[in-house]
Amino acid sequence: MSGSPLEDRGAGAAGGSAGAAGGAGAGEILHVTTPEAWAEAQQEGAVRPPSLATEGFAHCSTRDQLAGTLAAHFPGTGPLVGLVLDPARLDDLRWEASRGGALFPHVYSPIPVDAVVAVEELR
């Protein structure tokens, strides 16, 4: 995996809530997408994955959950990038039980481009 950090985009937007997870927010949060979707988001100013319209939130993972997420939801899919997110720049971040009861980060709003602090090639 090679990361290419983006420039720091300043103090950013409104802070999100860590939800009821109490400390679940520790560590990096990533959103998996395609290079094409990321390019479109950069033009529009926000990431709006299909799940935002169909489920009401954008799926994210922690660094530790990423391999499982890729295996479960993106087998044989590529190319993909991981958008590393600054939780303080997300409007509505919630930690909710998902696979096996593990708490996963879900963003209940479009992800502002200025919340993306790095972009990593995943495959």
Image (tube, grey):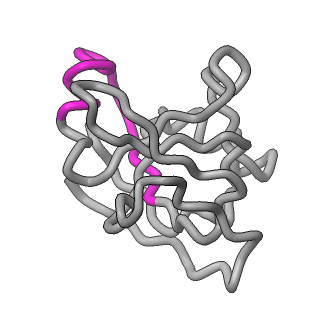
Q: Quadrant for residue 98, please give it.
A: top left
Q: Quadrant for residue 56, please give it.
A: top right
Please identify the residue farthest to the right as the structure is shown. Answer: 44
The x, y position of residue 104, in whole percent, is 38, 41
Quadrant where the C terminus is found in the figure: top left
Quick check: 20 left or right of 92? Answer: left
Nearest to the observer: residue 92 or residue 32: 92
Nearest to the observer: residue 76 or residue 116: 116
Q: Is residue 42 magenta?
A: no
Q: Quadrant for residue 53, please give it.
A: top right
The region drawn magenta spans: 68-84
The x, y position of residue 33, in whole percent, is 48, 35
The x, y position of residue 55, in whole percent, is 63, 19
Nearest to the observer: residue 96 or residue 78: 96
Residue 66 to residue 71: above or below? below
Identified at 49% across, 34% down, the residue is 59
Nearest to the observer: residue 85 or residue 106: 106
Quick check: 16 left or right of 83? Answer: right
Identified at 75% across, 71% down, the residue is 13
Quick check: 119 left or right of 76? Answer: right
Q: Is residue 82 magenta?
A: yes
Identified at 24% across, 19% down, the residue is 72
